[in-house]
Amino acid sequence: MTRRGRLETHVVLTAGALALVTGLVAWMVLSWIAKPADLGPRLAEVQRRTDAAEALLSHHSHIGAYPIDAVCARAAGPAANQLKQDVQTAAASAGVAVGRLEISPGVADEAMDGLSPINIRLEASGRYDQTVSLLKALARLRPQIFVDQSDLNAQVSVVALKLSGHAYCSLSAPL
Amino acid sequence: MSGAAGLRVIEGDGAEATSAAAPTVFVRTLAAPPGAPWDQARSVALEARIGAPLAAHEVYIEQRRLERWRLGRPARFAVCYVRREAVGGEYRAQVEVEGRPLSITFRAPVQRGRLARRWGLIAGVAVAAGLLLTGAVSAALDLRADTEDQLSRLEQTAAVRLRQAKVQARLNDEARILAANGAGRQTVDGMLADLGWIAAAKAPGAHIDALHWERGYIGVEARGLIAPFGTTDRTVIKADHPLRPGVWLWGVGPAGSATSPSGSGSPP
């Protein structure tokens, strides 16, 4: 090989190496540009949330026995006041006369792990159909009313209703 | 064009300048009026050709700007000539203009063309590389934006899914607690269903004075000895003794509690 030939080979090899290094550097720079700076931590957070959701769902099989708002997700005091207003409104709509209405926060029971009770005591009177209308309205109220016991006494032209029960609020933070 | 200096003769640089064969370089200075740099250079080139000491095809002409270009100011150029036949394809000379040394390279038109092609090629490659780089960076930025969008959607989906899972877990926990405490038999809907059953099952002529409902069990105060209910899909039992004269207490079990047509059971 002549001196010129060796020189050309050397130049070609150098240019090739330079092009390779340039391409590599360009690829690294472009990869760096194309990737959001916090991609790793954000993906890790997504993974953590997904894992947490799957773990929760796997440990809590679906029961679905009660509506999503059966238990209120706020403090029992304000919820009791609201429920009292709702019951009065329902009674007025049904045309039932309310003789006694006590709705107040109760003492949390250990058996009701995490649920704070609202005590309900209602005495009302009206025609049978009006009383049934009131009960239907009570069934739709939220938080849901659970009846401990109830008495219906037929009087001359009306029915006297006595009802005692509870509603519940969750002590856990609202989601 | 004005300010042309007189033609001076300068010998070639270094050892060549001292030898008898060194080509002679003619130098003159020309002034160009204020204008764009390329216009100034072009006018000087024209004047250099017109004022050449020999015919244009007999000399190589090179020109150098002596001062930096400034807006609205005239420029001065050094114009150098050398006879073509005295030099080969390329000739380098060191000249002195206004006390400053100046390095001049004269090239034959063929060499100039080759040099121009080389610089053209370099410029073309540079432009292509620039375009390629711009396109690559643009594509990378697009990819980054797409990745950001996908990541945001993924984060939102994960957040919603976790929130739903927490809600579901809370609901299930609450449902378990309520179920463990028998709340399933305490709903107002259940009570209404039982009242509906009583209305439907009430025997003709039966006279019910009062009802006591508790967790799906019903105590019925009815007048007379005849059973107040005609149907038998629930357990209905009668108390042994009347509550009051002529008024008997009947116990009714929850829905589906009847085990036989005559049924038996015990209310709470």
Image (cartoon, coloured by chain):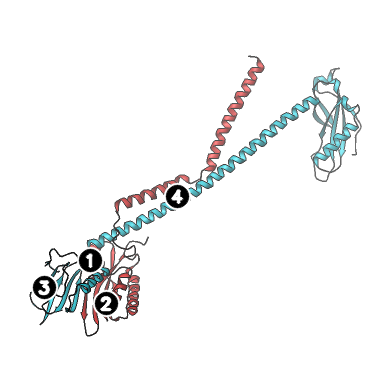
Chain colours: A red, B cyan
Does label 4 lie on the same chain as label 3?
A: yes
Does label 2 lie on the same chain as label 1?
A: no
Residue underneath mark 3: B238
Dot 4: chain letter: B
How far apart are labels 1 and 3 at the CA level?
A: 23 Å
Q: Mark 3 or mark 4: which comes first in sequence? A: 4
Residue underneath mark 4: B154
- What's the residue type where badge 1 is placed? Arg
Which of label 1 and label 3 is nearer to you?
3
Residue B1 is situated, as x and y percent measured from the top left of the image, at 89, 39
Q: Is mark 3 on a helix, strand or loop?
A: strand
Q: Mark 1 or mark 4: which comes first in sequence? A: 4
Q: Is residue B226 left or right of residue A126?
A: left
Which of label 3 and label 2 is nearer to you?
3
Does label 2 lie on the same chain as label 3?
A: no
- What's the residue type where badge 2 is placed? Leu
How far apart are labels 1 and 2 at the CA level?
A: 19 Å
Residue B139 is situated, as x and y percent measured from the top left of the image, at 57, 42
Q: Mark 1 or mark 3: which comes first in sequence? A: 1
Structural crowding at the residue carrying mark 2, measured as other residues with C-alpha within 10 Å and reported as few (<14), some (14–19) or many (≥20): some
Which of label 3 and label 4 is nearer to you?
3
Residue A169 is situated, as x and y percent measured from the top left of the image, at 31, 66
- What's the residue type where badge 3 is placed? Lys
Q: Residue at x 88, y 28 (%)?
A: B56
Residue underneath mark 2: A122
Which of label 1 and label 2 is nearer to you?
1
Residue underneath mark 1: B185
Which image quadrant is residue B23 in?
top right
